[in-house]
Image (tube, rainbow, N blue to C red):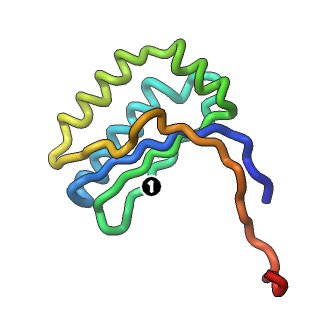
Amino acid sequence: MSTDPGFYSIIDYTVDGPDTQRELVKAFAAIQERWVRFHPGYRSARFHVSTDGSRVYNIVHWASEADYRHFVETSDTDGRMAAIDTALKGLSGEAKPRMTGAPTYTVVREVGPGPQRLDA
């Protein structure tokens, strides 16, 4: 398995239960579809929910940091942020962001499947 050199934005929210998880994923998926997915270099958005109902991670994959930066510079940030604010206000429960600063990352290592190493 090779390391994907892509660039990621990882958005992390605490929520108050499975219903809010479902609502937040639905709302954020709609935001990706309307505001993000057509930008050059966008690869995907994956949504992960914790099994205890307390967290939602939205991992947005870009082909490169340059593609992400171009998106940030040229997209309708005000419109997208207003859509996020509206989505959060429309939830039946509560969701709070946990990120600080720019939640962006690059992959530096990945361990894939293979034979057991006996010398480790």
Q: Nearer the viewer, residue 69 or 59?
A: 69
Dot 1 lies on which element? strand
- Direction from residue 112 to residue 82 in the image, left or right: left
Q: Give the residue type that dot 1 points to.
A: His
- Direction from residue 35 to residue 94 in the image, left or right: left
Q: Nearer the viewer, residue 42 or 5?
A: 5
Q: Nearer the viewer, residue 23 or 62?
A: 62
Instruction: Decide: is 52 above or below 36.
Output: below
**Residue 76 coordinates in the image, percent (x, y):** 43, 14
From the image, tell me which residue sits under label 1. Answer: 48
Residue at (49%, 27%) from the top-left corner?
36
Residue closest to the far right: 119
- Direction from residue 94 to residue 36 in the image, left or right: right
**Residue 55 coordinates in the image, percent (x, y):** 34, 56
**Residue 98 coordinates in the image, percent (x, y):** 34, 46
Instruction: Decide: is 81 above or below 100.
Output: above
Residue 26, located in which quarter of the rendered image?
top left
Residue at (17%, 49%) from the top-left corner?
93
Residue at (26%, 34%) from the top-left corner?
87
**Residue 74 coordinates in the image, percent (x, y):** 53, 12
